[in-house]
Amino acid sequence: MRVNLLEKDESYKINWTEIIYIIIIIAVLAIPAVNYYVNRLELKTLQSNKLSWQQQLTAIQPQFEYYQKLNQEVSNFKLPVKMEMESYQLSPALREFSNLVPAAIYFDSLNYQTGNLVITGNATTVRSLLDFLANIYDSTIFSVVSLERFQQESELNFKLTVKIDTPSKKGGIN
């Protein structure tokens, strides 16, 4: 068999450069169209969200006005400065007081009146009551004003008045 090498090949050839050019042209035209479509969908979604938010805002507007009115009333209501400061200074004192109480001491009542803490309770032994008094004596915040004790059967009942020296009275917080 003889083949003529000088003849032109008439078979189908793929020209890759033309295909790449066509793909680039299609991409240049299609990308803005797809971008426009996506942006249009997003715009419709945002408009529907805006409408629902406006409806929700009009629904809660009366409640918000009522809240503003109550907030204004609360801001106008102030406790006397002395009472506010006393409540802030009493909390750390009570926390420390809880550390001073031994396990054998039980309280029936605990009353606070202008710097004094009046405690009524009972102790299982005299030793536990003396330990409690020693803890109060060693404290930097508390000092014993008076102690009344009496015994009923096996229980030792007491009424103790303790003075609370808050930090403002000792030169701390003013």
Image (cartoon, rainbow, N blue to C red):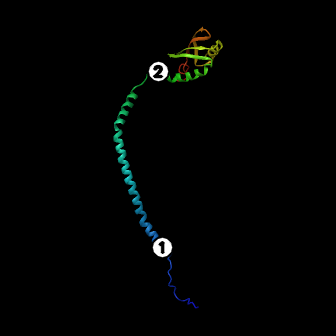
Residue 164 image point, x, y percent: 55, 17
Judge from the rendering whether residue 67 lies leftward or rightward of residue 98; answer left or right. left
- The secondary structure type at the circle numbered 1 is helix
Q: Amino acid at mark 2?
A: Met
Q: Position of residue 65 (x, y in %)?
A: 35, 35
Give the crowd class for mark 1: few <14, some 14-19, many >=20 residues within 10 Å.
few
Circle 2 crowding by C-alpha within 10 Å: few under 14, some 14–19, many from 20: few
> Is 134 on the left-hand or right-hand side of 52?
right
Q: If the image is split into quadrants, where does the N terminus sit?
A: bottom right
Q: Quadrant of residue 97?
A: top right
- Regarding residue 62, the answer to whether it shows in the image is yes
Q: On the image, numbered disc 1 is attached to which residue?
A: 19
Q: The residue tagged with tag 2: helix, strand or loop?
A: helix
Eye-nearest disc, 2 or 1: 1
Give the residue furthest to the right: 127
Residue to which mark 2 is pinned: 83
Is 126 positioned to the left or the right of 45 in the image? right
Q: CA distance from mark 2 to mark 1?
A: 87 Å
Residue occupying image coordinates x 60% and y 22%: 99
Q: Residue at x 34, y 38 (%)?
A: 61
Q: Quadrant of residue 126?
A: top right
